[in-house]
């Protein structure tokens, strides 16, 4: 390795004296107990190794475990003038326990470089997902910022779009160049390159193949019991794994990174440094606001002038990058005036942003979020009711209340539930000059849940 790389490597791992204040916080490296090809490990037992570049260089990364996550999304149909549901599949990959902590550690380092670079380039406020320097801020604050900016205008243009299969399309060469630019180096240190290579040229095994292996080994009853009781500490022995991977190991494509690793989020932000800078510069020329949450883009420009021209300029910036594709069905051109939001056909429309909807007069929770909350709460209530009848005594009532009612809203606690979140959003957004009905659909949640327990 060259002297330059040795110097860079020293800078990377001397975290306590780093000018970016990227120190190792053990609380961020939470031990998890999901079954994988290795066993769960405590960060303190691994800290010495993952902070040692030589150990990283000799480390063999295990395959990711892959499964498709299916869910329903709503896309805007311009011909119909409203959103229609469509099924979406998101490819999820999760790393082994040791690898996950390595990704977390190197992700923290890269985030330190990214934060400093973004601040220098004037784009620190642009990206709001996967950040480590936005302490105390949440989607509530980010959504409020957008709504507040719109309300400050007499008229405004609103452009929303997202990048299609963003993580799946990220170019490896482009990502590497962006990381080098953010870190201010011409070539990556060996250990950092090794980690980056493990998420760009990764291997994986499908979860369904693992389930078939476990079913064959234990039988369905025993397998379900092991998974339910969280007693399956390791999916298979090292010997079994060596045989198993010969038939089941798969290789990643020539582009994309796994969505699910602890390092993927910051890599996604780093990949878009040039795009963020160019779009932000364009939008600022018009006195506007540009924000990006992962692959979701929103732009608000005062006075609603040249809407198509500005949209085309934004698309042109993105299209210069071959690995970035704008989703055609998720691009909206809206206008705001006189407390009304209209679409391109001058019909009433909703701005759907970070779990909230805004029509120019009222801010509400997104219908999908409410549907998901009540569906889960009712399902849990049915389980509690059936177990109570079976055991002839109240069973898991406290668990139900903590997860899905106002009784889980413990003051002073960092984590709450959906009710906690809605109450916080209601309180935070009430300072805006519009009607805020975030909590209103949840006011009767207690009575609705109680009915399912009868």
Image (spheres, rainbow, N blue to C red):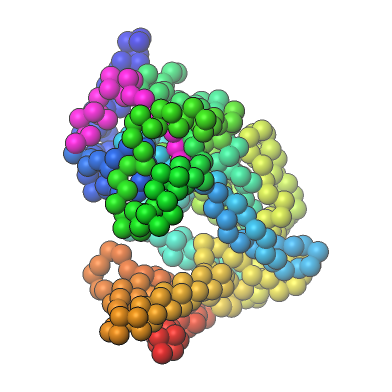
Residue 76 magenta:
no
Q: Which residues are magenta?
A: 45-66
Q: Is residue 444 visible?
A: no
Query: At which x and y percent is residue 204?
Result: 49, 35
Up/down of 222 relative to 109, above or below: below
Answer left or right for 33 relative to 245. Answer: left
Q: Among all residues in the image, which is located at the extreme right?
A: 79
Residue depicted at x 33% and y 20%: 57
Quadrant in the picture for the C terminus: bottom left
Q: x, y (%) of residue 49?
A: 24, 28
Where is residue 55? Give x, y as percent: 27, 22
Vertical comparison of 18 with 219: above or below: above
Which of 214 and 166 lies nearest the eye of the viewer? 214
Return the residue nearer the eye: 72 or 12: 72
The picture quadrant where one finds residue 281 is: top right
Judge whether residue 248 can be spotted in this image.
Answer: yes
Q: Which residue is pictured at 64% across the width and 63% down the height?
A: 74
Which image quarter is the N terminus in? top left
Assess whether residue 49 is covered by the magenta stretch. Answer: yes
Q: Indicate the quadrant where residue 417 lies.
A: bottom left
Residue sitting farthest toward the top: 2
Residue 348 higher or lower than 208, as above or below: below
Labels in figure, total: 0
Q: Is residue 97 left or right of residue 422?
A: left
Residue depicted at x 56% and y 69%? 368
Quarter of the rendering containing residue 20? top left
* Residue occupying the point 49% across, 37% down: 205
Q: Is residue 20 left or right of residue 212?
A: left
Q: Position of residue 306 (x, y in %)?
A: 73, 54
């Amino acid at each position: 390795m060259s002297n330059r790389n040795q110097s860079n490597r020293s800078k990377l791992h001397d975290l306590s004296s780093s000018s970016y204040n990227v120190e190792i916080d053990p609380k961020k490296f939470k031990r998890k107990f999901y079954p994988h090809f290795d066993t769960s490990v405590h960060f303190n037992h691994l800290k010495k190794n993952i902070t040692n570049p030589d150990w990283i260089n000799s480390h063999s990364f295990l395959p990711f475990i892959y499964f498709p996550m299916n869910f329903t999304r709503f896309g805007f149909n311009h011909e119909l003038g409203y959103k229609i549901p469509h099924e979406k599949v998101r490819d999820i990959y999760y790393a082994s326990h040791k690898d996950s902590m390595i990704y977390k550690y190197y992700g923290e380092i890269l985030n330190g470089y990214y934060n400093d670079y973004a601040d220098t380039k004037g784009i620190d406020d642009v990206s709001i997902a996967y950040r480590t320097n936005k302490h105390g801020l949440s989607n509530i604050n980010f959504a409020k910022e957008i709504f507040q900016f719109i309300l400050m205008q007499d008229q405004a243009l609103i452009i929303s779009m997202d990048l299609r299969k963003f993580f799946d399309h990220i170019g490896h060469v482009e990502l590497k160049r962006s990381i080098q630019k953010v870190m201010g180096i011409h070539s990556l240190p060996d250990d950092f390159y090794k980690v980056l290579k493990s998420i760009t040229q990764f291997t994986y095994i499908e979860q369904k193949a693992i389930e078939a292996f476990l079913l064959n080994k234990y039988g369905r009853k025993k397998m379900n019991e092991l998974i339910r009781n969280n007693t399956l500490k390791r999916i298979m022995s090292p010997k079994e794994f060596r045989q198993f991977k010969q038939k089941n190991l798969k290789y990643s494509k020539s582009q994309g990174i796994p969505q699910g690793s602890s390092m993927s989020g910051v890599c996604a932000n780093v990949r878009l440094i040039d795009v963020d800078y160019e779009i932000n510069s364009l939008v600022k020329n018009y006195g506007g606001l540009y924000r990006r949450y992962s692959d979701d883009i929103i732009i608000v420009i005062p006075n609603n002038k040249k809407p198509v021209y500005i949209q085309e300029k934004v698309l042109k910036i993105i299209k210069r990058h071959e690995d970035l594709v704008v989703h055609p069905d998720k691009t909206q051109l809206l206008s705001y005036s006189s407390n009304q939001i209209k679409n391109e056909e001058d019909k009433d429309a909703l701005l759907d942003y970070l779990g909230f909807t805004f029509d120019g007069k009222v801010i509400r929770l997104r219908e999908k979020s409410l549907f998901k909350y009540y569906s889960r709460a009712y399902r849990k209530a049915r389980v509690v009711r059936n177990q109570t009848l079976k055991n002839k005594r109240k069973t898991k009532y406290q668990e139900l209340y903590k997860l899905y009612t106002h009784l889980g809203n413990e003051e002073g606690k960092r984590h709450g539930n959906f009710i906690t979140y809605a109450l916080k959003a209601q309180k935070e957004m009430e300072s805006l000059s519009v009607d805020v009905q975030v909590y209103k659909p949840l006011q009767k949640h207690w009575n609705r849940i109680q009915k399912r327990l009868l």
